[in-house]
Amino acid sequence: QVQLVESGGGFVQAGGSLRLSCAASGSIFSINTMGWYRQALGKQRELVAAITSGGTKNYADSVKGRFTISRISRDNAKNTVYLQMNSLKPEDTAVYYCAAAIRLPTYDYWGQGTQVTVSS
């Protein structure tokens, strides 16, 4: 089992920045890819960014150039994934979820979500 705990959400004005953190613990040796999803009110959940254990990153077109995903592996029992979000826009408002995949395309583990609200 893998446990994911997000932090760092909040309220920010347009143009501002936030950094989300996701602490992964447990059987993280089984995890290849970690990602951030978001779900805005009334919309489907969408992938924002993902990073593999080899460091390959991919981003949704809507956040390219503004968001950066990174991953730190401290030991075999704990990883932390960050999502640095700059130049935030009101349309970035959503609940952001950390997710972990043993093998894509399926994400096997999910965090509880953290709210990001961007005011205009």
Image (cartoon, rainbow, N blue to C red):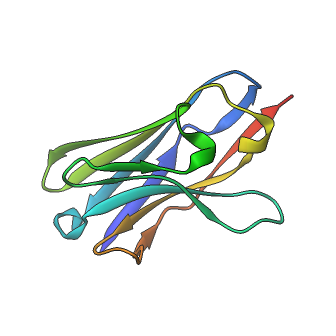
Q: In this view, does 72 lie to the left or right of 82?
A: left
Residue at the front extreme, as displayed: 61
Question: Which residue: 87% across, 28% down?
Answer: 120
Question: Which residue: 52% across, 43% down?
Answer: 7
Above-or-below relation of 98 to 31: above
Q: Quadrant of residue 81?
A: top left
| The one of 99 and 57 positioned closer to us in this rendering | 57
Residue at the left extreme, as displayed: 76
| The one of 104 and 19 positioned closer to us in this rendering | 104
Q: Where is residue 113 in the image (x, y as percent from the top left)?
A: 59, 57
Q: In which quarter of the image is residue 69?
A: top left
Point out the image quarter for the N terminus. bottom left
Q: Position of residue 67 (x, y in %)?
A: 52, 35
Residue at the right extreme, as displayed: 120
Question: Which residue: 68% across, 30% down?
Answer: 88
| The one of 52 and 7 positioned closer to us in this rendering | 52
Total tally of numbered discs in the picture? 0
Q: Where is residue 39 in the image (x, y as percent from the top left)?
A: 69, 60
Above-or-below relation of 86 to 41: above
Q: Position of residue 27 (x, y in %)?
A: 21, 68
Above-or-below relation of 50 to 46: above
